[in-house]
Image: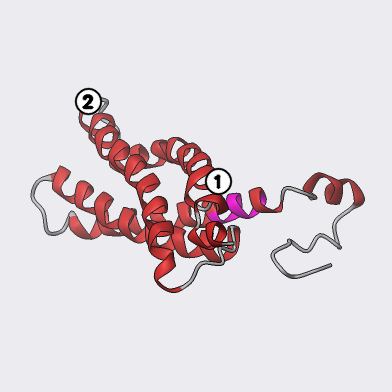
């Protein structure tokens, strides 16, 4: 089995190999998404716990934690999706438009999260950590469709257009 971007499926039963074949990118997207979700949520929880020690206002701690954890998770996601999921060939300055497309998709879900997080916390009186966890499925769906159809779409790449 080739190692150039395909998931090694040799050890799986035949039915599993048949089910996976042709869906390697989707599986990698899911694995990277799970990793990034765990990473981002862990950073959020850690920063929230840290910031509650320094801010008197509860919302200041969880909102600052949300902003900083989102920035770190976005950079983490870009690196993993670029090199693992979609294996984007772009390098050097040509990654700038790709990163802008990627980041624009994250901005949408980021602002949605910034609007919904205080609604869940202040209006519904949910804990900020539970509220952030409830936002995960929403941002996952937005990310999948946005990145697979826009951020890493080869037809949007200047490398593809030049050929």
The picture places residue 90, in percent across and down from the top left corner, at: 51, 67
Q: Secondary structure at mark 2?
A: helix
Q: How many marks?
A: 2
From the viewer's side, name the closer residue of 131 and 111: 111
Task: Categorize mark 1 by other alpha carbons within 10 Å: few (<14), some (14-19), many (20+).
Answer: some
Residue drawn at x 65%, y 48% is: 26
What is the quadrant of residue 59 in the picture?
top left
Nearer the observer: mark 1 or 2; the answer is 1
Residue 148, labelled with which disc?
1
Name the residue at 48% across, 72% down: 91
Task: Return the residue at label 2.
Answer: 123
> Which residue range is magenta in the image?
27-32
Q: Main secondary structure of the magenta part?
A: helix
Residue 160 location, quadrant: bottom right
Residue 76 falls in image quadrant: bottom left
Q: How is the image coloured?
A: secondary structure
- Tell me which numbered mark, 1 or 2, is placed earlier along the sequence: 2
| SS type, badge 1 | helix
Res 10 visible? yes
Q: Residue at x 81, y 59 (%)?
A: 9
């Amino acid at each position: 089995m080739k190692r150039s971007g395909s998931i090694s499926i040799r050890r799986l039963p035949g039915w599993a190999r048949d089910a996976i074949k042709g869906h390697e990118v989707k599986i990698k997207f899911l694995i990277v998404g799970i990793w990034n979700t765990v990473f981002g949520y862990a950073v959020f929880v850690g920063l929230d716990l840290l910031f509650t020690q320094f801010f008197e206002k509860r919302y200041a701690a969880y909102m600052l934690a949300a902003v900083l954890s989102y920035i770190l998770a976005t950079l983490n996601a870009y690196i993993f999706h670029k090199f693992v999921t979609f294996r984007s060939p772009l390098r050097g300055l040509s990654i700038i438009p790709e990163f802008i497309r990627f980041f624009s998709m994250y901005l949408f879900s980021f602002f949605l999260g910034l609007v919904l997080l205080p609604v869940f916390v202040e209006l519904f009186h949910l804990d900020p950590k539970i509220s952030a966890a409830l936002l995960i499925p929403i941002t996952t769906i937005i990310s999948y469709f946005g990145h697979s159809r826009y951020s890493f779409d080869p037809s949007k790449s200047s490398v593809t257009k030049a050929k």
